[in-house]
Amino acid sequence: MQKHTFTISLFAGIFVLTAMAQFGVINQYLVSVIMLMGVNIMLSTSLNLVNGYMGEFSCGHGGFMCVGAYVSSIVTVLLFSKNHILGAPLLPPSLALFAFPLALFAGAAVAAVAGLVVAIPSFKTRGDYLAIITLAANYIVISAIDNMEIIGGPRGFMGMNATVNGMEGLLDIPWMLLWVLFGTVFTVWLLRRFVSSTLGKGVPAIAQDEIAAEIMSVDTNRMKLIAFMLSSGLAGLAGGLFAHILGYVNPHSFDIMKSTEVMVMVYLGGMGSLSGATLSAILFTVLLEVLRPLEIWKWVVIPLLLILLMQFRPEGIMGNKELSDLFPKLKKYYSFK
Amino acid sequence: MPLLEAKGLTRRFGGLIAVNDFNIELGEREMVALIGPNGAGKTTVFNLVSGFYQPSEGAITINGKDTRSMRPHQVTSLGVARTFQGIRLWGEMTVLDNIRVSQHYRAGYSLLDCFLRTKKYMGREAEIERVAWELLEAMDLKEYALELPRNLSYGLQRRVEIARAMSLKPSLLLLDEPAAGLNSADVEGLIKLVRWIHETFPVTIWMIEHQMKVVMSLCTRIKVVDFGATIADGTPTEIQANPAVIKAYLGDDTI
Amino acid sequence: MKRMTVKVLVAVLALALGAFALMGCGKDSDVIKIGFNLELTGDIPKVGEASKFAAEMLKEDINSKGGLEVAGKKYKLEFVYQDNEAKADSAVNAALKLITQDNVVAIVGPNSSKQAIPAGGICNDNQTPMVSPWSTNPDTTKDRPWVFRAAFLDPFQGPVAANFAAKQFSAKTAAVLFDIANDYSKGLAEIFKAEWEKKSGAGTVVAFESHGTKDQDFSAQLTKIVAAKPDFIFVPDNYNQVALIIKQAHDLGYKGPFMGSDAWGSAELMTLCGKDCIGQFFSTHYAAAGAQGATKEFIDRYNTKYKYVPDDVAALTWDATRLVLQAIQEAGKVDKDIKAERKIVRDALANIKEFAGITGTMKFHGTGDPDKCAVVVQISPEGKFEFKESVCPQ
Amino acid sequence: MEFFQHFLNALQFGSFYALIALGYTLVYGVLRLINFAHGDIFMVGAYIAYFVAVLLLGGEGMSGLGLTPAMTLAITVPVTMILTSLVGVTLERTMYRPLRRKGADRLYVVITALMAGLMLENGNLALLGASRKSFPELMHKVVWTFGGVSVTNLKVVVIVAAIVVFVLLEFIVSKTKIGMAMRGISYDKFAIPLMGIPLDTIIVFTFILGSSMAGLAGILYAMSYPILEPYMGALIGWKAFIAAVVGGIGDIRGAIVGGFLLGFIEIGVVAVFPSTLRDLFAFSVLLGILWLKPTGLFGVAQTTKI
C-alpha cells in the first residue's frame, strides 16, 4: 500500500490542481506559470539524459523542441482549424480530445527522428565537437523554418487554439493544464524507468568509461541512439505542449537562448539527477516570474544568483543523487519507477 | 575446434609494427600466459582479440566465428571478457551496478519492455540481479555491493574488475596484468582467486603478467613475445631455460 | 552537512513558491490601472524603453492635473510595466499577470508581432482590451474583437514606398535587402516586391537579399546587389542596421539612392549613420522636422526630458495609450467590477471611429486596425526628417 | 569582379571570426574550458575602446582631451587591450578559479562562463541604457576601387592585424618559455606545478593574452561597424566558437583557419545561393565537416591507451 502512496498522491495532486484552476482558486496567470513550469521540467529532465547521464554537451535542445512544436501544431491546425493549406477543418472539433495526444506524439516522433542528426555523428565524435554539431542543428532547424513560407516562416504559425477550444467544447475544464501535468509526469516516469533499468544504466557507463562500456558488452552506438532520440523526442513533446499553451509558435522562440536556459536548468539541478532537474526547473521558472518587477536588472540578478549557487554547490542542487537517496525515508513512499 | 584461433595477426600503427605475425590456438579450460618486455605488443594482442582494434592482417576466430569487422560488444557476446591494465571500473556506479551493466547483452529486452515493465523485462532483470549477487557472494564482495568502486582499495578494485568480467559468463577470460600494483598479500589472494575461477567455471584464462610468481604458479603454457613477434612458446620449465627469452629480458652480454 | 544544504534549499524553494502564490493585491478604487507589456530586455530593448518613456510622460501629464476625469470624477492613473524579454512565452505570462494579478483595465503592448500575436490571443480569451502600438502583422488583431492597434499595416506601407520611389527616382529596377528573422521586415519586403513587379513587370526587382537580426556585416549581400545595378535599394530594416547597410554599400562603391520604411524613424539613425544617410527617403507615420501642433509639442517635451527625439514607437505608444484613456472616458463610468469595466472600455474602444493622434488621424472600421496616412520624409543635410509627401488610403 | 569583391569581404569578416576564435582556443588549449563569456568580453572591449576614444577625442557631449584621431587610435589600442584583459582576468579570478579549486565538473565552469556573459550583456544594458553608441571615426576612411572591386583602408588593416596576431601568438606559444608552459598544462595539469611552474600565473597569462585579443578585435570591429550595442558580442561569439571548434579547438592554426573558413562559407553561400538560405547552408556545411573530420581540421584525435 505504502509503495503506491506516491503515485496516488501524484494523481490526487493533479486532480486538485486542475480542480483549483477550474473553480478559480488559482488564477490564470498562476495556471500559465505552472504549465510553463511543467514544460521546463520536461525539457530539463530530457536534456539531463544526454548532458547529465551521458556526459555529452548538447547545446541545441531548443531545436528539437522547435521541431516538436511545429509538427504537432501543423497536425492539429490541419485537422481542426480553417487554414490556408487545406481550407476547412478535416475533423469536427469534438474529436480534438482524441486527436490531440496523437498530434503530440507525432511531434515527438519527428523530433526523435531529428535527433538522429546529432545521434549519428556521436558515434564518431564526442565532447566539444559534438556540442558544435548540436549547436549547428539548432541553427539549421530555425533557419529551415524561416525559409518555409507555407508555415509562416519568421512570421510564426498559429491556429492551435481551435483544438484547445474543441476539447473545452466537449467538457469545460482546463485541458491544457491537465495535458501538461500528464506530459510532465509521463516524461519523468519514462526517464526514471529508463535510467533505473540495466539497459538504461549503459548510458552513465558510456559517460564514465566508454571503452570499458563497449568491451563489457554495452552496444554504445545503440545506447547513444536511444539516449539522443529519447531526449529529443521528449523535447519535441514539450515543444508540442508549449505551442498549444501559447496558441502561437515562432521559430525564434527556440533559439540558442532557449537552449541555454535548459542547459542552465540541467547543471543547476545536478548532472544525472532527475529530481535535481525537476527542482531546478521549478526554481528557475519561479525565479523568472518573481523577479519580473526588477525589469532590466532581472537578467543581471538571475545569472548572478546562479553563479553564486554554483560557487556554493559546484555539483548542482542535487549532485547526481535523487531525493530518495538523500531522504531514505522517502523510499517507503517512492515507487515512481 | 579450438576456442580461439589467431592466424598471422599483424597490426601496424603508421610505420610501427606493434604485432607481427602472431599465431595462437587456445583450447577449452587452458590457462596460458603471454609475457614479454614492456612495449612488446602484448596489450595490443588483447585489444585485437577483444575487437577494440582491427587487425591490419590476419584473422581471429572465436568458436569458429571470424571476429573481423565485429565491434567489441559483439565479440564480447561471443564469450570473451577482459580486464584492463589500469583499472577501468565505472567509478560513479555502485559495485552492484557495475556488475549489472556488464551483463548488458543479456538484457535482451526492447525499450518498450523497459518502459512498460513487461514480464520479459522483470524476468531478465531478476536474472541479471541474481547473477550479480551470486557472483559478489562467491567472490567475497557482497559487503561492498553498494559502495562506489573509487572508494575501495586497489586490491578490491582488481577483484571487482575480475568479477565484472566473470559476470559476462565468458568462455575466454583475458587478464591484463592482474597483479600489477598489488602487494604480496594481495598477490597471494589473486593467485587463489584465479585458480578458484579456473576450477569453478568452464573458462579458458589468458593473462599478461610480469610477476613470474603468478605466471609460474598458475599457467600451464607460456608464450613470449618481443618487438611484436613470438620468440618462444612452451611449458614454464621450457621457457625458463630458453636462451632467446633470457636474451630478450636481460640483454645480450649478461650471459 | 550536505543534507542540510539540500534541506535549506528545499525550504527556500518552498518559501519562494508560497510567497509567489500569495502575490497579487487588492484594488484601490480611485485608481485606474493600465498594463504595459513591453520588450524592456532581450533583442529590442530600445523599443521597450521608448514605449515606457512615452507612457511615463503621459502619466505624469494626467496625474499632475489631478488624474483622468471620468464622469466628473478624477482618477489617478497607475501604469504597470511588465517586461516580456522579447519572448513569446514571456509575453503571454506578462499579459496574464497584468490581467489576473495586477487587475489592469487594459493593456498597451507588446510592440513586436512575435509577442503581440500570442499576447493578443490571451487578452482576447480573457476579455481584456489590448492595443498594440507597433505590431504590423495582420494576425495580431484578426478575429479578435478585444485587440486593437495604432500602427498602419504593411499592405498599406509597401505600395506607398513603391509608388514614391518610382516617381522620385524615375526608377525601373529595385533591389531589396531585409531581415529574414524579423517578420515586420520580411513581410514588408515581400509586399514591396509584389507591388513593384506588378507595376514595372516581372524581374524588375533585380536583387532580393536577406540577412539575420544580429548581423553587422552585409558586404556579401550588398556586393550582389551592387552588381545587379538597381536604380535604388529598398531597405525595410531597423535603423541601427540601416546605418551599417548604407555605410557598407557606400564602401562598396554604390552611389544610388535608398528608400526606407517606418522602422528608420529614430533620432538615433543620424547619430549612427552620419553623413551617409543624408538625402535618403523613407515612409513613416509622421515627419518630426516639419511637425506641428500636438506632434511638435510631444517631440519637444520628449526631447527635453529624455535627451533624444522620440522614435515612432514612442509616438505610437503615446497614441495607443491615449486611445485607451479616451475609451475609458467615453465609457462614461468606472465600474467597480473589473470585468464589467473591461467590457465597457472595449465597447468604447470599438466605438471610436476617428482618433486624432500625434502620428496622424486614425479611422477605425470595426477591425481594430486603423486607416491612417503615411508620410514620406527625406533626411536633410542637418539630419532632420523633412516632410516630402503624404499618402492617404483611398 | 564580383568574385574578388566577395573574396575580400570574406577575408575581412573571417579576420574577425579568427581574432575572436583565437581567444576561445587559447583558453581552451590551456584549461579545457569553453569560455562562453568571450564574445561578451569582446563586446566590453568595444565599449572600452569607445569610452577611451571619446575621452581622448572629445565630442559626444564630453569635452575630452581633444587629441587628433591618429593619436587617439595609437593610445586607444594599448589601453583597450590592457583594460579588456583586466575584465578577463577578473572573471577568471572571481568565478572560474574558485570553481576549479572546488573540483567542480568542467561543465559547471562552462555554465558559469555563460552566466557571466549574460551578466556583462544585461549589466551593460541596465547601466548604459538601450541607446546604441556610435563609434567615432579614428581613421580617415579611404575607398580604393580597382576595376569594380572596392577596398577600404580599414579592411586592409583588419586583415593584416589578424595575420600579425596569428604570427605573434604562434611565436609565443611555440617558441617562448611561457608558451611551452601553456602547452604543458594542457597535457598534464598536475605535473606542471611539480616542475616548479606556477600554474595560476600561466593561467592568468593565458586569460590576459586571450582577452587582450578580444579587446583588439573589439576596437577593429567598432571601427569597421561603428554601432555598439550590448548584444553585439553574443552572435559573433557563438559563431567564433564554432569556427574554433571546426578548426580544431586548442590549436592556434585551427582557430585562424576555422575563422577564415566560416567567413568564406557564410559569404560564399550568400554569393551563390539566395541569401535567405545562408544559415541553413552554412551550418549544414560545418556539420558535414565535423561529420567527416570528427576532431576538426587541425584537432588531433585523443588516442586512448588501454
Image: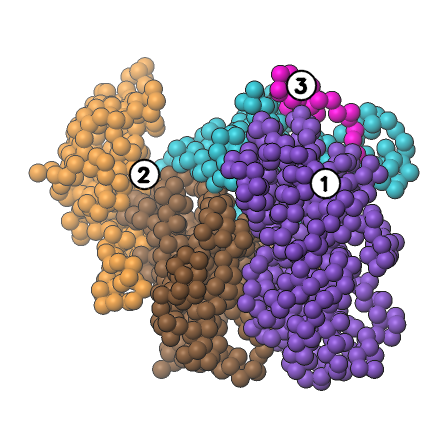
Provide the letter of the chain coloured purple.
C
Tell me whether marks 2 and 1 sit on the same chain: no
Q: State the image quarter where residue A92 is shown.
A: bottom left
**Chain to which the residue tagged by mark 1 belongs:** C
State the extent of the magenta-drawn residues as a range: D134-160
Q: Name which residue lies at 23% across and 44% down.
A: B74
Secondary structure category for the residue under label 1: strand
**Spot occupied by residue B73 in the image (x, y as percentages of width and height):** 27, 45
Residue A270 visible to an observer of this rendering:
no
Residue underneath mark 1:
C281
Q: Residue furthest top?
A: B253
* Colour option used: by chain
Residue underneath mark 2:
B177
Provide the letter of the chain coloured cyan.
D
Q: Which of these two is toward me, B158 or A332?
A: A332
Taking the image as shown, residue C198 lies to the left or right of residue B177, namely right
Q: Colour of chain B?
A: orange
Residue underneath mark 3:
D145
- Residue type, label 2: Glu
Instruction: Kindly report the distance in space between the C-alpha atoms of the residues bearing marks 2 and 3.
Output: 72 Å
Where A84 falls versus A132 (above or below)? below
Q: Residues within 10 Å of mark 2 (few under 14, many from 20)?
A: some
Q: Colour of chain A?
A: brown
Q: Residues within 10 Å of mark 1 (few under 14, many from 20)?
A: many
Where D305 falls versus C56 (above or below)? above
Residues marked 3 and 1 touching at CB (< 8 Å): no
**Spot occupied by residue D226 in the image (x, y as percentages of width and height):** 73, 36
Instruction: Locate the N terminus of chain D and report the quarter of the image it occupies.
Output: top right
Q: Residue furthest front?
A: C394
Instruction: Kindly report the distance in space between the C-alpha atoms of the residues bearing marks 3 and 1.
Output: 27 Å
